[in-house]
Image: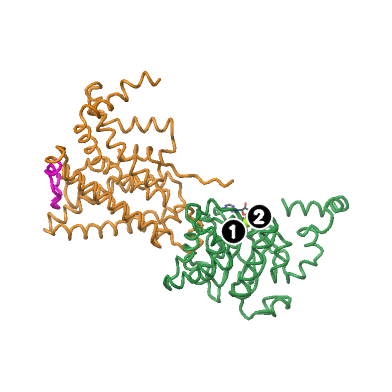
Chain colours: A orange, B green
Amino acid sequence: MYDAVYPFLIEPFAKMWTDMPLFFAETVISGVMAGVMYSLVALGFVLIYKASGIFNFAQGVLALFAALTLTGIMDNFGAPGWLAIILTVAIMFGLAWLIQKLVFNHLINQEPIILFMATLGLAYFLEGAGDIMWGSDVKVVNLGIPQGASQWLLDGPGLYVEKLEIVAAVTAAILVTALTIFFQKTRIGRALRAVADDHQAAMSVGISLEKIWIVVWAVAGLVALVAGIMWGTKSGVQFSLSLIALKALPVLILGGFTSVPGAIVGGLIIGVGEKIAEVYWGPALGGAIENWFAYMLALAFLLFRPQGLFGEKIIERV
Amino acid sequence: MTQTASSPAPETAAASPLLKVNNIEVIYDHVILVLKGVSLDVPEGGITALLGANGAGKTTTLKAVSNLLRAERGDVTKGSIEFKGDRIDHLSANELVKRGCIQVMEGRHCFEHLTIEENLLTGAFTRRDGSSAINHDLDMVYGYFPRLRERRTSLAGYTSGGEQQMCAIGRALMSRPTMILLDEPSMGLAPQLVEEIFEIVKKLNEDEGVSFLLAEQNTNVALRYAKYGYILENGRVVMDGVAAELRENEDVKEFYLGVAGEDRKSFRNVKAYKRRKRWLA
Ligand SMILES: Nc1ncnc2c1ncn2[C@@H]1O[C@H](COP(=O)(O)OP(=O)(O)OP(=O)(O)O)[C@@H](O)[C@H]1O
Ligand SMILES: [Mg+2]
């Protein structure tokens, strides 16, 4: 078995690493950018799923909607970037409130499949709403995020790295750190974890599930906004943005549906993995590996480790 | 409060009881009638026991009060519930906790992935009186449950059943309640531990002035600590009285305290045996 797969699966990496370390590093770094996007979208999924058991199909559209709103405010009202961001955050929070009040408050105690269908409807609604309000042409996010190669890395080790990629990685890292502190150290964050553990017990101590779910949707909206800004800066704000949600699915299978670290690590593995696969096996398999690599990897995981890399630690007392 | 124990009926003893459940009917899933007119009074400052076999409706009664029924598709369809003189049947659990009535659920329901201390702090969620007051009460809880202090940083899911029961009670205390609805604290615990927990309940009742409505299958222990008891069967109150008197009651002795030898009873009186079976099924 090992001898059979080694030349195809392992050797290429070893070779790439030893023969072309810089090229390898560049490939990995460009994979990180895509990976960060997947991670952010998957993170939104995980938060909502953990706290409410809702499988939120609309997470990708949420990113599109956020980016559309941001560019819409900037283009149509000439608002400066910082103001547009604040307004968009406010709109995403308002949206979270509306989603809970108008949709999920009426679906309490319903089957998961019904909740899922509701998010499906939500996805189409948001897509349409974004379209009607801000138009369907491709928009450019113009927040002054630096573009082009990082001169410093080019001059130094001779690496070609997009500045945007660095900004995206750093922003995502800051966001994840801030969220971690929020979940671990604050009263609301603690309540949120309590709700994720046991709905009834949370209710019994006076935690309002409705409030917590609004917070969760708001956080998911915030994460979606960051993803929307990064992706929009790179490729423009257009419908395809919502499709990164489809890539988040394999990320979830890899990382485990209820694990925040899993979402992040899973996203990075898939982002980096598909880039490397494309570069190395692309010629051998006729290219476009990037399109299906994530799903194959997810399939392999489903067969061998269905709970994912970081699948929830199930506590069993002895 | 001490008069209540010696007077036969609480309705006449206390002008207005802390909790008054008035002839409630509860239906699950719109069709399953579980409580068929339950009334009970919990006086302020006492421990009142709600007894009965599996499926009698004890948990349902407590959840009707704490308003956790809706999450189980249960509904109070008749009757009324008053706490401190106000109707509470349509208040959310959250509002009820703010008013001082909190439930400790059957089976503890600690937050497994939170530490013991985090669990306790979730109990203070509804409070707005600042972190120094909350920390003070955290110390108070650790005072009553020294074991929880030792296990402060352990995930609740990894602690023992007894520690989880203490954690669940401590968590409820953190809301500064007037009344705790305590559902089967003895479940699955060794007799010695049951005794330990009931001693603490008694102390909380005496020193902190917390009133308890205590649902128990363990009639023996419950009647030793409670002042008054109600016996529930098939969704109806079939008997109530001062705890000391209930303990002397022949039926209670036979069906719940198991004083008479089971074999002899069952052979001598087939009808009683069947009743017993139904009660304990
Ligand atoms: N969510 C529910 N849906 C339908 N029926 C229910 C539900 N919960 C409880 N019941 C039914 O209501 C009746 C009373 O249940 P309840 O849990 O109140 O009894 P209990 O006295 O607490 O019993 P135990 O001592 O076993 O805890 C039982 O017949 C039970 O099957
Ligand atoms: Mg019960």
- Asked if the magenta segment contains residue A150, the reply would be yes
Q: Residue furthest top?
A: A4
Q: Residue at x 25, y 43 (%)?
A: A242
Tell which of A60 and B67 is nearer to you: A60
Callout 2, which amino acid?
A: Leu
Callout 1, which amino acid?
A: Gln
Where disc 2 sits, the SS reads loop
Tell which of A165 and A151 is nearer to you: A151
- Rendered image: mark on residue B165: 1
Looking at the rendered structure, the number of numbered marks drawn on it comes to 2
Q: Which of the 4 image quadrants contains residue A312? A: top left
Q: Percent from the top left, x then y, of residue B110? A: 53, 56
Q: Which residue is mark 2?
A: B189
Q: Give the left or right position of residue A18, taking residue A156 as reference.
A: right
Please say whether residue A128 is visible from this viewpoint.
no
Q: Percent from the top left, x then y, of residue A164? A: 17, 45
Q: CA distance from mark 1 to mark 2?
A: 9 Å
Up-down: is B217 above or below B143?
A: above
Residues shaded magenta:
A137-153
Q: Quadrant of ligand 2?
A: bottom right
